[in-house]
Amino acid sequence: MNLHAKVLVIIPAYNEEGSIANVIQRIQAVSRDIDVVVINDGSRDNTVDVARAAGATAVIDLPFNLGIGGAMQTGYLYAYKNGYDIALQIDADGQHNPYDIPKVIEPILRGDVNFTVGSRWVEKTAYKSSAARRVGMVIFSNLIKWVTGQICKDPTSGFRAADRNVIAMFANYYPVDYPEVEVLVHIANSGLKFQEVAVEMSERQAGSSSITPIKSLYYMVKVGLAVLISATRREGVL
C-alpha cells in the first residue's frame, strides 16, 4: 500500500491484552508507513506492555479510565500535534479488519469527504447482530438523517477515518459518552461531509465488552437526547 499522506491509527484500549498485539501486527502488515498510537484507557491488565512489545509507534497510558470519548480525543490531540493528514479509529478487540484501511481512507485521499465510516450495512456481509442492536441502528440512522440530511446506516461503527479538518476539530472538542452518533451530527453541523464505506467485521477476538444491557439502554436515551438537542440548536430553538 503506497501512501501519499501521513496516516495514524488510533486504538483506544481498555483491558485488551488478549487481542491488542494481533491488531497492531495486522495494521503493520497492511503498511509499515502507517503509524499506530494506542491509548491505554486506565487498563488493569497488561495492555500497555503488550502494545509496546507488539511495536506500536506510541502508547499513551492514561492514569485512569476516561471512557471512549476521552481516549479518542487524546488520540486526536496526538494526531494534530504530530501533523498527521489522516487519523483512523480502530477497535482494540480485533473486530475491525485492518486490510480495509485502504478502502476506508480512499474517499478522503480523493478529497471527496472529510470523514468516513466503515459500515457493516452498505453491502451484504457475513456480520450478524442482535435484533435489539438492529433496531437501535435504524433509530439512530433516522435521527441522523433528520438532523443532518446525510445518511449513515451504521452510525455506531468504531471503524472511522478523519482528515486534517476533522482532526483539528476533535482535538479541541469530542463528545464524552458513547460518542459515535454525536460525532456524525457534529461533523455535518460543522459544514463537513462524511461517507460510509463497506467493510467486513467479525466478533471480538478476546475479552468482553464493557457495554451491559443497562448501559445499552442509557446509551440509547443519552444519544437520542443529544441528537435532538443538536437539532434544536441548528433550528435556533435553544
Image: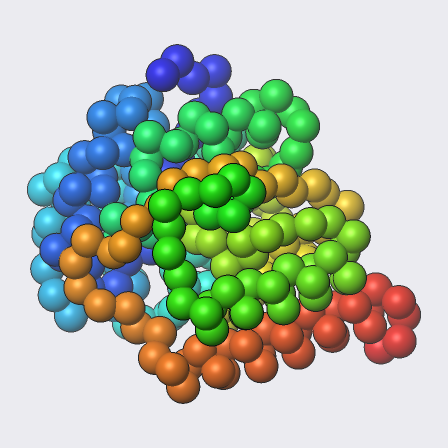
**Residue ID at (47%, 28%):** 103
Residue 147 percent coordinates (x, y): 77, 62
Looking at the rendered image, the quarter that the N terminus falls into is: top left
**Residue ID at (12%, 55%):** 18
Q: Is residue 182 visible?
A: no
Task: Decide if residue 4 is on the left or right side of residue 173.
Answer: left
Question: Which sits in the foreground, 29 or 165?
Answer: 29
Query: Is residue 216 placed above or below 180 in the rendered structure?
Result: below
Colour basis: rainbow
Residue 76 percent coordinates (x, y): 47, 48
Question: Which sits in the foreground, 226 or 201?
Answer: 201
Question: Which sits in the foreground, 74 or 190?
Answer: 190
Residue 40 percent coordinates (x, y): 26, 58
Query: Is residue 82 placed above or below 78 in the rendered structure?
Result: above
Please identify the quarter of the rendering in which residue 12 is found: bottom left
Query: Is residue 101 placed above or below 155 in the rendered structure?
Result: above
